[in-house]
Image (cartoon, grey):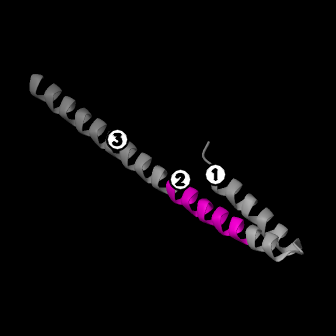
Amino acid sequence: MADTYEACCERADKAAAAAAAATLDNVRDRELRAEKTWRGLAEKARSVAEQREKVEREKREQREAEAEAAAEAAAQEQGLEA
């Protein structure tokens, strides 16, 4: 299951809080690495979502243009037959 931007940010925030509360250096380092990883995953999820929206918008615009062209062609054909 792919994580959403918000879910990844939430996990990063939890890791940051755990790092701040850690008393052992190795635990703090582990949590800081986890935070960095979750922030990277959040950014990737955001990027993928934006790209998906762009592709969907372009496909929708193409379908609308094709429908308009088909309607114009049908109207011209009707005009020639009359």
Q: Secondary structure at mark 1?
A: loop
Instruction: Please determine whether, in this image, residue 48 is positioned above or below residue 43.
Output: above
Q: Position of residue 78 (x, y in %)?
A: 17, 26
Question: Can you tell which of label 1 and label 3 is closer to the viewer?
Answer: 1
Q: Which residue is mark 2?
A: 49
The residue that appears at 43% across and 46% down in the rendered structure is 56
Q: Which residue is mark 3?
A: 64
- The image's mark for residue 4 is 1
Question: Can you tell which of label 3 and label 2 is closer to the viewer?
Answer: 2
Viewer-proximal residue, 55 or 32?
Answer: 32
Q: Earlier in the sequence, mark 1 or mark 3?
A: 1
- Side (left or right) of 79 relative to 18: left
Instruction: Please determine whether, in this image, residue 33 is positioned above or below residue 63.
Output: below
- Side (left or right) of 17 relative to 65: right
Q: Position of residue 57 (x, y in %)?
A: 42, 49
Q: Which residues are magenta?
A: 32-49
The residue that appears at 86% across and 74% down in the rendered structure is 24
Q: CA distance from mark 3 to mark 2?
A: 22 Å
Instruction: Please determine whether, in this image, residue 64 is positioned above or below residue 54.
Output: above
Q: Position of residue 82 (x, y in %)?
A: 12, 23
Q: Earlier in the sequence, mark 2 or mark 1?
A: 1
Dot 2 and dot 1 residues touching (CB under 8 Å): yes
> In the figure, residue 44 lies in which quadrant?
bottom right
